[in-house]
Amino acid sequence: MMTLIAMAISVAYFYSTATVFGLKGVDFFWELATLIDIMLLGHWLEMKSVLGASKALQLLVSMMPAEAHRVKADGQVEEVKLEVLEKNDIILIKPGEKVPADSIIVEGSSYLNESMLTGESKPIKKEKGNKVIGGSVNGNGSLKVQVEHTGKDSYLNKVIKLVEEAQKAKSKMQNLSDRAAKWLTYIALLIGFGTLAVWLIAGQPFVFALERMVTVMVIACPHALGLAIPLVVAISTAVSAQNGLLIRNRTAFEESRKITALLFDKTGTLTTGVFGVNRFEAIDPTFTKEEVLRLASALEQTSEHPIAVGIIQKVKELNIKVPRADQFNAITGKGVEAEVEGKNVKVVSPGYLKEKNILLPTDAVSSKAETVVFVLVNEKVTGFIALADTVRPESKVAIEMFKRNGVKTYMVTGDNKIVGEAVSKELGLDGFYAEVLPHQKVEIVKQLQDKKEFVAMTGDGVNDAPALAQADVGIAVGSGTDVAAETADIILVNSNPKDIANLILFGKATYTKMIQNLVWATGYNTIAIPLAAGVLYSSGFVLGPAVGAVFMSLSTIIVAMNAQLLKRKIGNK
C-alpha cells in the first residue's frame, strides 16, 4: 500500500533536489512538506481507529486479576500470582473481586457479573456446585472455589485465542478487498506514468507533468480499500466476543446474512430444559390457587422427582411458605399423601382419579404437552397443577425477529409429536420434526438444502456434530464455558434464541459495512484519479498533491469511522 506514496514522494523529492543543484525547473518542496504532513496526520487518525478496534480484545485480556487468595491445607490464606495456580487448588474470592480462574464453588453463594464474558446483562446467582468463569466479577458474597481450568485451558484464554484467529483469518470478502487493492496499485502506477507521458507529449512543462503524476499516485493510494475490510473484521470479532458470540469461521459468519432456514434443537434452546409449573388452578371455590400449590408443596418438599422439584421451584418464586407434612405415605405409581394442618392431602395422577371413579375436571386437560397432577383435600378434588418443559419467554420474540427477516424456523426434537406440535404452535414455527435421533438430523439438513434453502443448524456441538458440519452455518449453542465445539462455525455462550437472531442481524450489519466501505473506497478512486490526472485542466481546475493527500486521508478516515459505527449494532441485546 505504501508503494504509491513512497514512489510519489521519492520522485518529487529527487526532482526538487536536482533543481537545487542546477537542473532547469521549479522545485516543489513546499507542496512535498505539506503532502507528508497531511499523510502523517491521516496515518495517525487511521491507526487511532485501528487501535480502537483492538481495544475490545485488550479489555478481554485485562479482565483477569494479577493475584489470587489461595487457601492452604491448614486454612491459612496466601497471596499467589495467577501463574502459580494449579488444578484443584482452593481459592478465596472476596466480595467485589474478580474470579482468578475457571472454578467450581465449594462454599458460599453470591451473584456474579459475567456481562463482559457472555453478554448476560443481569448478575447470575451462583451457589455450591455451580461453575464460575475466570474474569467474572463477584458480587456481595464471599466464595471458596476449587480451580478447574488455568492458563491456556481457561474460558477467557480460549475466547481470546478464537478472536485472534478470527481476526487473522481471511474471508472471501477480505481476499477480494486485498486483490482489489493490489490491482488498484498497478492501475495507479500505469495511470501515473501515463499522465506524465501524456502531459509531456501535450507540450506541458516537466514540473507540471510530474506534479500531475505525483497527485495521481497519492490520491490513488489504496489505504481506504485496504482498511475497508480488516477494520470491520477486527471490530466485529472483538465486539461479538464481548456479547457471547464467538466466531470460528469468518466466511460462515459473513454468510449468515443468507440464512433462509434455521433448525432449532428444542430442549434448552427454545425451552428452558427444566420441568416447571405451567399453570395451577383451584377447582373448589373455598380454596385459592395459591393455597392449592401451598398444600401440594408440603408433600413434595423432600422429593427429588422432577414434578416435586418443579412444584417447589414455583413455590420459591412466589415466596409461599411451605407447611409441615406428617404421616407421609407413597401411593404406589399414583402419587403421595400426608397430613397437612389436620387435613388429609393427596397429590395424585389422573390414573388415581379414574381408579376412584372421580370425574376429571374439564379445564385440567389441555392440548399442550403437559403432565397434570391433582390435589385432593379430604378425598375431594381441590385443584390441579400442570407441569411442562416451559418455553423460554424470549423464544417468541426471537421467532418474530426471524419472520421479519424472512427466515423460516423449524424445530428438531427427540420428544413425541404432541410435545413438538404444542411448542411449534405456541411459538408459530414454520414446522417441526419430532422423535428425531441425533444421526437423523443430518438428513433433515440435507433435505432442506435440496430445496435450495441456506440452512443454519443450532446444536450443542457434541451429539449434533455431523449436522453442524453439514449445515451451511453451524451454530453451537449453550456451550457455556466449553468453547471447544470443533464442528461449529459460530459458538454462542448462552442458549438464548435471541442471541441467534442477534447473530444473523449482526452478520448482515457486518456485511453491509464491508460493502459500504468497498463502495466508498472504489467510488472515491473512480472520481478522484481522473481529477488528479488533470481532466478538468482546460476548465481551469487543477488538483495539487497536498489537496490530493487531504482527499486520500479523508477517504481513509471515513472508512474507519463507518466501521466504528458497527459497535452500535450489537449493543441492544
Image (cartoon, helix red, strand yellow):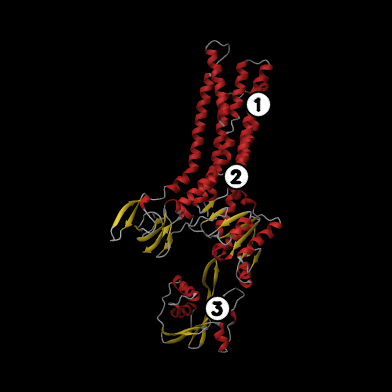
Indicate which disc, 1 or 3, sits on the residue closer to the N terminus: 1
Q: Position of residue 77 (x, y in %)?
A: 29, 57
Q: Is residue 116 left or right of residue 362?
A: left
Residue 358 appearing in the image: no
Q: Which residue is mark 2?
A: 171
Q: Nearer the viewer, residue 133 or 470?
A: 470
Say which amino acid is labelled 2. Answer: Ser
Quadrant (top left, top right, bottom left, bottom right) of the N terminus: top right
**Real-space CA distance between mark 1 and mark 2, rounded to the nearest whole angstrom:** 29 Å
- Disc 2 crowd rating (10 Å Cα; few below 14, some 14-19, many 20+) is some
Number of marks drawn: 3
Q: Position of residue 24 (x, y in %)?
A: 58, 11
Q: Residue at x 60, y 50 (%)?
A: 252
Q: Which residue is mark 3?
A: 372
Marks 1,2: beta carbons within 8 A:
no
Indicate which disc, 1 or 2, sits on the residue closer to the N terminus: 2
Say which amino acid is labelled 3. Answer: Val
Q: Nearer the viewer, residue 310 or 449?
A: 449
Q: Is residue 107 left or right of residue 370?
A: left
